[in-house]
Image (cartoon, rainbow, N blue to C red):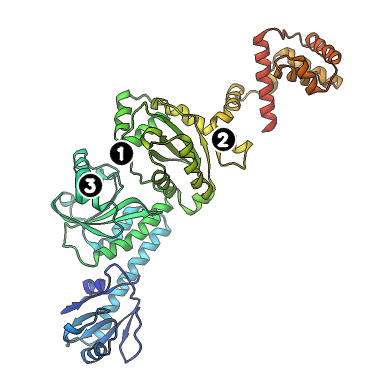
Amino acid sequence: MKLNTYILKDYLDMPVEQAILHSDPLERNLEMISFYENQAINTASIYIINGNDLSDLIKRGKTGTFLCIGRIDSSNIPSGMDVLMVSSEISIFSAYHKLQNVFQRFYNFEKDLYQLEETDAPLKLFGNCALPFLYNPITMYTPSLRMIFFSERDKGKQLQFFHEEEVNAFLPDEEIDVLKLDSEFISTIDSTKPGIFSENMWGYRILYYNIRISDIYVARIMLCEIDRPLKESDACILMFLSEYVKRMMQKQNLTLNNHPQRFDPCIMKLLQREEMEPFQVQQALTEMQWTTDDRYFCALIRISSYDQAIHTVSAVCCRLEATLPGTASLLLDDYILLIANLRQGKTTKEQVLMSLAYILREGLLKAGVSNEFDDFHNLADYYDQAHAALHIGSKLDETIWCYHYEQYALQYLLDRAAGEHSTRSLCPPGLVKLMEYDKKHQRSLTQALQVFLEQNMNIAKTIRILYLQRATFLYQLQRIREISELDLDDMKVRLELRIVFAIMKVRECE
């Protein structure tokens, strides 16, 4: 792990009598320790130097990072130079070993984080790993203020700041309502650098850093100033910890959405067709500023093996919601469910799908799309439509990215009607007789019957398609009636035959 002068100042095991620091406290560029011997200055090194040599470098306008043995006049130190001044009684070798101990300690910290990453460890263990440095309680929340994990030194249960029952729970509703109106909190949401939230809300300061995936705010990791005052180096270390936390979020495909706490459980219950009171559904939707009778449709996106391999599913969910107004994305096993509220998004289905196309094509993804609906209680039915469209469309039309249910509705109904039954068992006895006759005598009367029914028993259209003379077809039709004993004048008989023929055609294509 690269360090900076702020970290060295805070963790150096010897008194720093004066620190003149001009560098960015969030940047880390120091990799090694060197003794200054009138050589060119390397920006990746901190140099151990005596006062006379440092004064000479200052006169010559040099820059760099130095640990100075002895005090010098600090008024002339240039802006491109960081200097830590220690007592002249400390030997250069002792200073070297003290610096080396800090580098080694943070090297071990990075190694431990890497090992946790390799073993897909829970996020809490990453926070635990940082406690010896950050000391204060560490926690992480989703944008909707649900706790993901916390890490805290063992102080005995009564002295613990956080408790296990708070994990995966939201902040109390009254606190969430206050934060929604707090101008200071609102201003922190778009922050891309660490910041400090004042003690006005809870009585203690919070050092926070917003984690972003694909430039979308997905979580906030925080250090609560409870056990010791915040240090200048804390922000840099918190950012370093966040790099690993972010990678693990992507690797573990954690969906840290911004949905209110009742929304996702409500969706899951509806999809599982569990009984829910109407007021419970409306309550969950109200928090999203949705109503049960808004205009909706849903899309089901199959997660590709590529996305699973590079762990970008959470990023896709976040990007969908950020790009498509009025939508919510949920991760369901091997799919992403996108629910679009057209009223809340002030858009149309066609406009949403046009924007969705870019994301799907870019990610080599495919989606099934339901019909529109205006009763949210029936969500499961339209989820089934999207699933059916994706399943059937992927088999029949591999080259397109989006499958609309209305294009595959008939086939879906036929599949449902046929179930697991064999095609022959679905045929009425008369049709079986006709097919057996064709097979035995090498005729095509079954095909002629199918075309005749498809043309609504129009003889002229049928003979054009079959390339037959009228007399020939009329003779075939007479034989069909005689062999099958089917009453083709009965509408129900004709409907049954057409359904069976359609099922045959579907199964031939599979």
Residue 433 position, x and y percent, is 77, 14
Which residue in the structure is indicated by mark 3?
163
Q: Residue at x 49, y 47 (%)?
A: 359
What is the quadrant of the N terminus in the image? bottom left
Cα distance between the residues tagged 1 and 2: 31 Å
Q: Give me the disc on residue 391.
A: 2
Residue 116 position, x and y percent, is 38, 59
- As shown in the figure, which amino acid type bears the numbered disc 1? Pro
The one nearer the camera, 370 or 233, is 370
Q: In this view, does 78 lie above or below 260?
A: below
The one nearer the camera, 314 or 404, is 404
The one nearer the camera, 149 or 143, is 143
Which residue in the structure is indicated by mark 1?
260
Number of marks in picture: 3
Q: What element carries label 1?
A: loop
Residue 495 position, x and y percent, is 65, 14
Cα distance between the residues tagged 3 and 2: 44 Å
Whether residue 254 is visible, yes or no, is yes
Residue 224 position, x and y percent, is 20, 55
Few, some or many C-alpha atoms within 10 Å of disc 1 (few <14, some 14-19, many ≥20)? Answer: some
Q: Name the image quarter holding residue 378.
A: top left
Q: Is residue 146 above or below residue 76?
A: above
Q: Residue at x 40, y 29 (%)?
A: 295
- As shown in the figure, which amino acid type bears the numbered disc 2? His
